Amino acid sequence: MAGGYAVLDVETTGLSSGWHDRVVEIGVVLLDRDGAVTGDWCTLVNPGRDLGPQHIHGITAAEVRRAPAFPEIAAELAGLLAGRVIVAHNLAFDARFVAAEFARAGMGVPVRSDLGLCTMELSKSYLKTSSRSLAACCAVAGIPLQRAHSALDDAYAAAGLMVTYLGLEAARPEPWAELVDGALVRPWPLSPGGPAVPTVRRGTTETGLFVERIPRSYDAVAVLSEVDGYLEVLDRTLIDRVLSASEQDELVEAATVRGIDRAMADALHRRYLAEFAPPSPADRAAVADLLGLPAELADRPAERAVWGTFALRPGDRITFTGETVKPRELWQDEARSAGLVVSPPNICKWTRVLVAADPDSLSAKARKARDYRVPVVVEDGFARLLAEMPRTG
């Protein structure tokens, strides 16, 4: 074990660590006893649920869906924290969430406010500022805060505050020596060994067209019924003119299991656009772009109206998931005014669409919708579907 400090920050799905909220990102900066940085560590964490206030932390489900769950990184994180004084800006919040996640992973750890240091509380003694927010404290101390609500950046900012406090105490005996020495001998639970799980940072998402992930060739030729099945999946995923990462995965799988290679997929995409009913140039251009087709193909009118005919009708059942940009209550009022049935907070096989704040949502409703092949649409797509509904009266 190495002595010193582990400065951490967590981004979460909400404020309730003891109920249903989870950690979605954790960053750690390691300092020695004198305040020198000796390392850092950060990962996104798959919470197994929706991501809560994404407008605050800025993390998308497309980034998190490939990230490890907390139990998968618990051992590595414990190794970083053991033997060090845990430091955070608003330590009570971060310690509560970290301890709760370890507990759910079956590890009781000594992560408590009274065993660590809170840079927010310490600012009352070391900084002249009325606001104790991380941004305000950093501004007074002259510490750069690169991206607020990014766990590693916030951890580095809090580490900067800790170094500032240590510097102000430099003329005295080592501050917090008792805490540092106590951390060195404090026992941590033994965790099971095994290979470390790769961490995932922000911005780690699949790039390029999904078509490029479809196998180049197959020996067998796909039969007509399999081709139609692929086009049906394609039509469902394009309802909102957005292909989420989850939908792209579904299309790659749909092609693979049907023996559709990349050349055949391209031919089917051209056929789909040629038979795409909506005449809107914007819609046709969006579909062509998503399928990697030449833009000029979108300028041609449909040869026949086969695809793109999905529409909502009065009496259809819909539901919502996640914290939408427009308040959910307003969406629900608009939906009811159009004659739609806003269902209870669940999904069934008769649900027509699930409106998601994030199209790659990890919520239970989103997972069930995908199992039932219920279209998952973004807010803009839902707004278009509402506008296109037949009006009565």
Image (cartoon, rainbow, N blue to C red):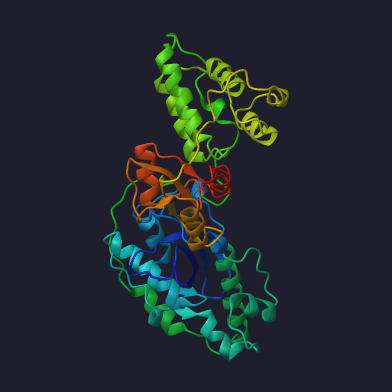
Q: Is residue 9 visible?
A: yes
Quarter location, residue 17: bottom left
Residue at 32% over, 44% down: 348
Closer to us: 303 or 375: 303
The location of residue 341, given as percent across then percent down, is 40, 51
Residue at 54% over, 18% down: 268
Closer to us: 273 or 27: 273
Q: Is 349 located above or below residue 81 in the figure? A: above
Q: How many marks?
A: 0
Rendered-image quadrant of the N terminus: bottom left
Closer to us: 263 or 286: 286
Q: Is residue 259 visible?
A: no
Q: Is 8 located above or below residue 258 in the figure? A: below
In the picture as drawn, the residue positioned furthest to the front comes out as 393
Q: Is 380 located above or below residue 274 in the figure? A: below
Residue at 34% over, 47% down: 347
The location of residue 41, given as percent across then percent down, is 51, 58
The location of residue 139, given as percent across then percent down, is 69, 77
Residue at 41% over, 60% down: 77
The location of residue 66, given as percent across then percent down, is 45, 44
Quarter location, residue 303: top right
Residue 321 horizontal side relative to residue 187, left or right: right
Residue 255 horizontal side relative to residue 134, left or right: left
Closer to us: 159 or 128: 128
Residue 225 horizontal side relative to residue 57, left or right: left
